[in-house]
Image (tube, rainbow, N blue to C red):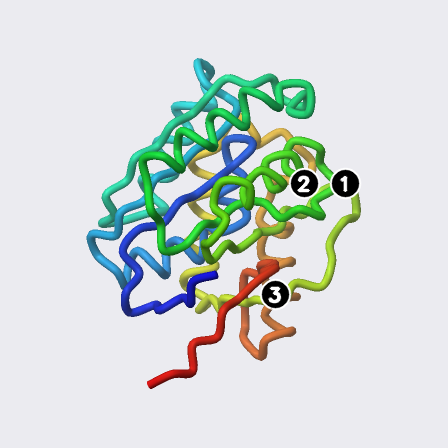
Amino acid sequence: MRALRPDALDQVVLLGAHCDDIAIGAGGTLLTLCRNRPGLRIDALVLSGGGTAREAEEHAALAAFCPGAELKLTVLDLPDGRFPATWERAKEAIEQLRARTEPDLVIGPHARDAHQDHRTLAELVPTAFRDHWALGYEILKWDGDLGAPTVYQPLPEDVAEAKVERLLRYYPTQSGRYWFDRETFLGLARVRGVQCRARYAEAFYLDKLLVGLEA
């Protein structure tokens, strides 16, 4: 495993099963990171939504969540809710991404997510990015799978508000969902903030970390 050095973070890979997963799970972290690392190279892969209105939403949204970054986004058309049955295509997409990138950080879903699409993607991450610092984001949903994350990114109030504003603005196809609203996003951010002594925060799961204590 490689140690993460924030001052040397130049390239990031973002992974999502569905359009909006990345923004929901790590939108505030992306805003913070991109504002502090101008010119950051970001290679994003979303496995479903290609060829639909959701693909256009995702391009506009990630551009807004990654200001000043050199962003490359690929949206595929795997069938929503059927990723275990299309494992070969998902695996090939991850391997192709790995072949063309050498990230300092990978951000994607976490392996204990109850949604089968999220979990399938999360389980593929370490098969391709075996020696990389990988953060697994969380997405609040009906399944009741919120756990005890181990990594927190505090979010100032203006960043938390900016995340919510962008989610509601750039994903209009999701506006009718009962959970897709301001209270949901700020509510979870407030809980995670309490857990790290901040007003708001995003939380992540991390399975392995190399601690570099040498001078």
Q: Nearer the viewer, mark 1 or mark 3?
A: 1
Q: Residue under circle 3?
A: 190
Amino acid on which disc 2 is placed: Trp
Amino acid on which disc 1 is placed: Trp
User: In the image, is 125 to the left or to the right of 103?
Assistant: right
Q: Which residue is at 49% across, 66% downward?
A: 153
Q: Residue under circle 2?
A: 179
Q: Is residue 27 above or below residue 90?
A: below
Residue 151 location (% of width, % of height) = 57, 66
**Mark 3 to mark 2 CA distance (whole Å):** 16 Å
**Mark 1 to mark 2 CA distance (whole Å):** 9 Å
10 Å neighbourhood of mark 1: few (<14), some, or many (≥20)? few
Q: Secondary structure at mark 2?
A: loop
Q: Earlier in the sequence, mark 1 or mark 3?
A: 1
Q: Secondary structure at mark 3?
A: helix
**Mark 1 to mark 3 CA distance (whole Å):** 19 Å
Q: Secondary structure at mark 1?
A: loop
Q: Residue under circle 1?
A: 142
Q: Is residue 28 above or below residue 123?
A: below
